[in-house]
Amino acid sequence: MIVVVMGVSGSGKTEVGSLLADQLGCKFYDADDYHPVENRNKMSRGIPLNDQDRYPWLCSLHELIKRESACGRQHVVLACSALKKAYRKTLTTGRNMLLPEDPCPHSEDDICSVTWFIHLQGSMKLISERMQKRKGHFMPLTLLQSQFDTLEPPAAPELFLTVNIENDISEIVSAIKAELECKISNTH
């Protein structure tokens, strides 16, 4: 199973994802570590990324999680904003969903059936308060509204859980772990 902890900047993806990976005993990756320098520079100047900026980054993340999945690892956790449905499709298929539909919709690269999206959901007020407290991150508070504007929450047929981030981090991680374990046992 591949778990993508998603949401707007400041929602707690990295912290939740790393703790969840520890509890599941699996590898954790933070998508921010894979942004090209140009993307980081653009965001640090307060300029939102566009789809063309994101596509190569999402493809490299797809390759990373596909490779981990192919290695037979039990689980992999990735923290990634994955704000749009098209971005999540690129993560799970490696195809650019912003181009006309691929004539071959199913390929060996498609990992949709083993990828769960955990949407960390919170209010603009709560997340902006959290962002004001963090130090040294390249994503400025001024881009938070653009993140909310871009967000397309996951929906069926995607495999997803939506989790409110108002609770304590340990409660959030425990609830996600329990829900995922329940989902896994129901599919076997």
Image (spheres, rainbow, N blue to C red):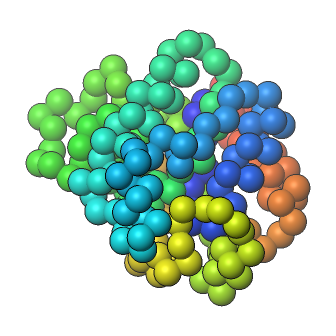
Front residue of 113/14: it is 14
Compared across the picture, whether 9 is left or right of 112 comes to right
Quadrant of residue 106 within the rendered picture: top left
Compared across the picture, whether 140 is left or right of 130 comes to left
Q: Is residue 128 above or below residue 36?
A: below
Quarter placement of the C terminus: top right
| Residue 1 image point, x, y percent | 60, 30
Q: At 48% from the left edge and 41% from the top edge, which residue is drawn?
A: 34
| Residue 128 image point, x, y percent | 64, 81
| Residue 131 image point, x, y percent | 66, 74
Q: Is residue 4 visible?
A: no
| Residue 108 image point, x, y percent | 33, 20
Q: Is residue 73 above or below residue 164?
A: above
Quadrant of residue 156 within the rendered picture: bottom left
* Residue most extreme to the bottom: 125
Front residue of 88/159: it is 88
Q: At 67% from the left edge and 35% from the top edge, which residue is drawn?
A: 28
Q: At 50% from the left edge and 15% from the top edge, which residue is drawn?
A: 70
Compared across the picture, whether 66 is left or right of 26 comes to left
* Residue most extreme to the top: 71
Q: Is residue 60 visible?
A: yes
Q: At 74% from the left edge and 43% from the top edge, which residue is drawn?
A: 18
Count the labels in the image.
0
